[in-house]
Image (spheres, rainbow, N blue to C red):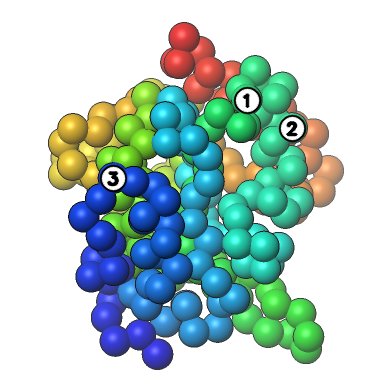
């Protein structure tokens, strides 16, 4: 079990993504590490102008060690392409770096991370923000949005708005991207008859993000 409630002691004083990723592999900042296969750090170029933040890795991501490589990730790649954004030139990460799940027989069922997990993992997200220094930051889903703006933030109330990180922000004052919040692609996969409409909304939000880059 974890002996601390924060990842702060594990985050090195560096802006190099490779060094941050290597250090994150040994993070014991909360109890999620004990059951997860591995830490799933962000991926993408250090000079990316756009960063997208999701909730946490899923089962596929936990096994492969990369974010957004499962079904939701494939959906996100398609939406990014339709919005005119090159996924390979964007930095993708999650608010929580370990897979939170419950077991049901041999299956591992996604479990929304607790607020404590989000807070414990925030130093990693802050380090990624300081390293990449994106011009535009897209928060995918409620957990990612609340990791940036606090637990009282409501995605539905602020979707479509161009926001700035709060003061104090998860990163230092030198990082001030334009921020948009939208739904997580996994919500679309669970959307039933509303999938098509939800997907169109995600693409529209990502197009807005692309326009902010221009």
Does 210 sit above or below residue 141?
above
Label 2: how many residues lie within 10 Å, few (<14), some (14-19) or many (20+)? some
Q: Position of residue 142 (x, y in %)?
A: 48, 50
Q: Is residue 4 left or right of residue 33?
A: left
Residue 64 can be seen, yes or no: yes
Q: CA distance from mark 3 to mark 1?
A: 24 Å
- Which image quarter: residue 167? top left
Q: Is residue 112 left or right of residue 136?
A: right
Label 3: how many residues lie within 10 Å, few (<14), some (14-19) or many (20+)? some
Q: Which quadrant is home to the N terminus? A: bottom left
Label 1: how many residues lie within 10 Å, few (<14), some (14-19) or many (20+)? some
SS assignment at label 1: loop
Residue at which label 3 appears = 15
Does 86 sit above or below residue 71?
above
Q: Is residue 200 left or right of residue 36?
A: right
Q: Position of residue 65 (x, y in %)?
A: 60, 62
- Which image quarter: residue 100? bottom right
Q: Nearer the viewer, residue 57 or 206?
A: 57
The residue sitting at the top extreme is: 214
Q: Earlier in the sequence, mark 3 or mark 1?
A: 3
Residue 147 can be seen, yes or no: no
| Image point (21%, 55%), residue name | 13
Q: Earlier in the sequence, mark 3 or mark 2?
A: 3
Q: CA distance from mark 3 to mark 2?
A: 30 Å
Residue at which label 2 appears = 78
Q: Earlier in the sequence, mark 1 or mark 2?
A: 2
Q: CA distance from mark 1 to mark 2?
A: 10 Å
Depth check, mark 3 against mark 2: the one in front is: 3
Q: Which mark is residue 86?
A: 1
**CB under 8 Å between callouts 3 and 1?**
no
Does 175 sit above or below residue 37?
above
| Image point (53%, 46%), residue name | 43
């Amino acid at each position: 079990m974890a002996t601390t409630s924060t990842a702060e002691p594990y985050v090195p004083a560096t802006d190099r993504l490779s060094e941050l990723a290597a250090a994150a592999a040994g993070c014991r900042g909360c109890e999620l590490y004990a059951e997860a296969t591995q830490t799933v750090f962000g991926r993408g170029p250090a000079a990316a102008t756009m960063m997208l933040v999701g909730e946490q890795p899923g089962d596929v991501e936990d096994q492969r060690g990369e974010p957004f490589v499962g079904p939701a990730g494939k959906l996100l790649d398609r939406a990014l392409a339709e919005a005119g954004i090159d996924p390979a030139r964007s930095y993708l990460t999650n608010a929580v770096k370990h897979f939170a799940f419950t077991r049901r027989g041999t299956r591992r069922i996604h479990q929304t991370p607790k607020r404590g997990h989000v807070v414990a993992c925030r130093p990693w997200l802050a380090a990624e923000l300081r390293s990449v220094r994106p011009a535009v930051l897209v928060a995918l889903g409620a957990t990612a949005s609340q990791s940036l703006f606090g637990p009282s933030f409501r995605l539905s109330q602020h979707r479509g708005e161009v926001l700035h990180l709060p003061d104090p922000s998860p990163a230092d004052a030198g990082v001030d991207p334009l921020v948009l919040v939208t739904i997580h692609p996994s919500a679309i996969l669970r959307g039933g008859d509303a999938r098509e409409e939800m997907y169109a909304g995600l693409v529209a939000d990502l197009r807005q993000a692309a326009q902010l880059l221009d």
